[in-house]
Amino acid sequence: MSHPLDQCLSGSYIRQVNHAGSDEPNKVPFGKWDSFSWQEFPEWEGTKAIMFRSPDGKRVADAFRESATATMTYPCDEFSYVTAGSIKAHVHGSEKFTLKTGDCVYFTKGQIVNFECNEDYANVSVFFGTEPVTMV
């Protein structure tokens, strides 16, 4: 009997989400980053796909397609990996930088960041908080 992950690795990209945060072995979320169910995310002029949310809401993994220009004060930590396009970022008190496809970044709670997404920007992110993550 084949495992669904074998099919994913072979290229058929079956996906599985885990919105309830179950730790059961058969509930491991996986799939190609853009294969999940997408919903509108107007705050960032784009869409989002939530892959995992822990039962206490303090950990969330998802994917985003965004095109906004915005400033944000981080309510939690975020690790992000750019899957398409680019984004300009300026962490207040530091230098400006640009993240491109294949780059990653880690922002910490309390940092204030200015963002400028290009039109085809996309990423996968994991949010970690001491309180439930409500921004996504």
Image (cartoon, rainbow, N blue to C red):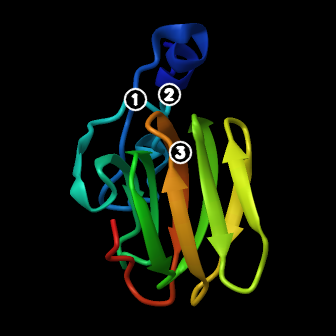
Residue for badge 2: 32
Q: Which mark is residue 51?
A: none
Kindly identify the amino acid type of the residue bearing the numbered disc 1: Arg
What whole-number distance in Å separates the C-alpha atoms at marks 1 and 3? 17 Å
Looking at the image, which residue is at 74% across and 59% down? 97
Kindly identify the amino acid type of the residue bearing the numbered disc 2: Lys
> Going from the N terminus, do you reach mark 1 or mark 2 first?
1
Graded by Cα atoms within 10 Å as few (under 14), some (14 to 19) or many (20 or more), the crowding at tag 1 reads many
Q: Nearer the viewer, mark 1 or mark 3?
A: 3
Residue for badge 1: 15
Graded by Cα atoms within 10 Å as few (under 14), some (14 to 19) or many (20 or more), the crowding at tag 2 reads some
Q: Position of residue 116 (x, y in %)?
A: 52, 56
Looking at the image, which residue is at 59% across and 36% down? 83
Looking at the image, which residue is at 64% across and 80% down? 108
Q: Position of residue 94 (x, y in %)?
A: 77, 79
Residue for badge 3: 123
What whole-number distance in Å separates the C-alpha atoms at marks 1 and 2? 7 Å
Q: Quadrant of residue 133?
A: bottom left
